[in-house]
């Protein structure tokens, strides 16, 4: 069962609609009890880092999710700010991240982004797969995804980076460490490219 963590932040219905289209069982969790039976977890996120972290904490689900991911090794994919929350922290706020991946989230340096590449990084962009993982299997040639962010994820161990994207600089756009996956882009807004990625997560990760 794919369980989408609904703590008030993210495109919950978009994920549900895709899994319904794929005929893959999916549900949402708004409470600790809603996490019972989860075999795969999706941690969505949009907006400000601290706001998302605080909402997740206030939901009462953070400790249970942490146990599922860290101790029980339940596969999880974080999306956009949900991926950034997996790092140790972010330039965007003061609250600590979940620390599931040895990484930190930095703000794009405006001096490295030309006038033709404004912030936030918004719209469609390519990803360059740099490591073979189940999450990125069977994607079409030159896969493109929808992005919306002004901060980027920097891994301290480059082995955790599985895809990169160029926007002024090359930055990590997808990660994987053991059972933990992340996508800076929005697969739920990325048409057939995103559908294949979410199918991979449900069936292969």
Image: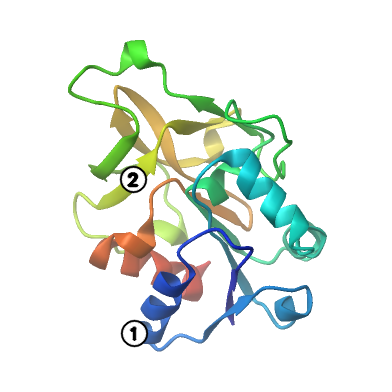
In-image side of 31 versus 193 (left or right): right
The residue sitting at 42% across, 23% down in the picture is 108
In front here: 174 or 58?
Answer: 58
Q: Is residue 184 above or below residue 113?
A: below
Quadrant into which the N terminus falls: bottom right
Q: Which mark is residue 138?
A: none
Work out whether mark 2 precedes mark 1 in sequence or the reverse, and give the earlier one: 1
Q: Quadrant of residue 16?
A: bottom left
Is residue 137 at least partly visible in the picture? no
How far is the residue under mark 2 from the one under mark 1?
23 Å
The residue sitting at 78% across, 66% down in the picture is 72
In front here: 157 or 32?
Answer: 32
Q: Which residue is mark 2?
A: 147
Asked if labels 1 and 2 touch by Cβ distance under 8 angstroms, the answer is no
Q: Is residue 130 above or below residue 58?
A: above
In-image side of 166 versus 90 (left or right): left
Which secondary structure lies at badge 1?
A: helix
Q: Is residue 67 above or below residue 54?
A: below
| Residue 137 x/y as whole percent | 36, 61
The residue sitting at 67% across, 73% down in the picture is 30
Q: Quadrant of residue 58?
A: bottom right
In-image side of 131 versus 190 (left or right): right
Which secondary structure lies at badge 2?
A: strand
* Number of other residues with Cα within 10 Å of mark 2, as a class: few under 14, some 14 to 19, many 20 or more: many
In-image side of 58 versus 178 (left or right): right
| Residue 12 x/y as whole percent | 49, 69
Q: Which residue is mark 1?
A: 21
Q: Quadrant of residue 86?
A: top right
Outermost residue to the top: 111
């Amino acid at each position: 069962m794919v369980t989408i963590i609904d703590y008030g932040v993210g495109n919950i219905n978009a994920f549900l609609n895709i899994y319904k289209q794929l005929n893959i069982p999916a549900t949402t969790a708004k409470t600790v009890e809603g996490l019972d039976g989860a075999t795969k977890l999706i941690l969505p996120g949009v907006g400000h880092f601290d706001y998302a972290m605080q909402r997740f904490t206030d939901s009462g689900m953070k400790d249970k999710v942490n146990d599922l991911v860290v101790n029980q090794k339940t596969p999880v994919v974080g999306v956009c700010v949900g991926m950034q929350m997996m790092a140790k922290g972010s330039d965007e706020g003061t609250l600590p991240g979940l620390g599931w991946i040895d990484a930190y989230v930095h703000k794009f340096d405006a001096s490295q982004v030309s006038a033709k590449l404004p912030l936030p990084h918004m719209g469609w962009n390519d990803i360059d797969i740099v490591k073979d993982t189940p999450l990125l299997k069977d994607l079409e040639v030159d896969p493109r995804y929808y992005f919306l962010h002004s901060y980027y994820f920097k891994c301290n161990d480059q082995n955790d980076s599985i895809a990169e994207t160029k926007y002024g600089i090359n930055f990590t756009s997808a990660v994987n460490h053991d059972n933990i996956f992340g996508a800076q882009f929005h697969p739920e807004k990325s048409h057939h490219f995103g559908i294949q990625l979410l199918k991979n997560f449900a069936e292969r990760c």
